[in-house]
Image (cartoon, rainbow, N blue to C red):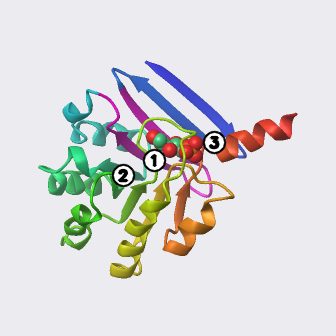
Amino acid sequence: MIVILVLISGSIYAILCFCGLNLYLKISTCGRALVDFAVLTLSKYGNQIHCLDYVEALAKAGASGFTFHIEVSKDNWRELIQSIKTKGMRPGVSLKPGTPIEEVYALVEDENPVEMVLIMTVEPGFGGQKFMPEMMDKVRALRKKYPSLDIEVDGGLGPSTIEMAASAGANCIVAGSSIFELQSRLKL
Ligand SMILES: O=C(CO)[C@H](O)[C@H](O)COP(=O)(O)O
């Protein structure tokens, strides 16, 4: 297993890579510990991932949010949301670029709903990919339907794309390369 930990301006980013699976932990220390966790289905092992297996460990580690991919949770998302909430974490659902936005509506409208939707604006796998502007249709559809929902976008976000995402209705972004590249430029 490879673990990469990076500290920038008080925020810790961790990436764990093992068995063909990448686990991304975003840890922010603004006020209280905040850890968002996403199981990304990038490899041939993707369909064998059981998100439920990770809930307890992440809660024990201090996570306050747990985001799972709908593509690997179609059969058990209700159980997963319940388990995440029982452990005191905030449930979120993520979807890959090829997954229609309609697939998350049931999770947002359920009596025990997710509290955040993460729209991948690149294929899950690695940083440095090109932002997919066509994903903004999903953001717009979601924002129109759910005015107060937290909508996060992840992939290729930076100074040239953030405005597109914000005006489509996203209120949270994940930025990797644009921050790290800036850091390296500042060190030169
Ligand atoms: O998790 C990802 C891909 O799987 C993200 O796209 C990544 O963490 C953000 O990086 P970047 O800003 O370089 O696109």
Label 2 to label 1, Cα distance in Å?
Answer: 7 Å
Looking at the magenta stretch, what is its main secondary structure? strand
Image quadrant in which the C terminus is located: top right
Q: Residue at x 49, y 68 (%)?
A: 170
Relative side of 99 to 73, left or right: right
* Location of residue 81 in the rendering, given as x and y in whole percent from the top left corner: 23, 56
Which residue is identified by label 1? 122
Contact (CB < 8 A) between labels 2 and 1? yes
Look at the numbered disc 1 and say if its residue's Cβ is closer than 8 Å to ligand 1.
Answer: yes
Tell me which label, 3 or 1, sits earlier in the chain. 1
Report which residue position mark 3 lands on. 177
Range of magenta residues? 21-43
Q: Which secondary structure lies at badge 3?
A: helix
Q: CA distance from mark 3 to mark 1?
A: 13 Å
Q: Which residue is mark 2?
A: 97
Question: In the displayed structure, does residue 135 sit left or right of residue 163?
Answer: left
The three-letter amino acid code for the residue at tag 1 is Val
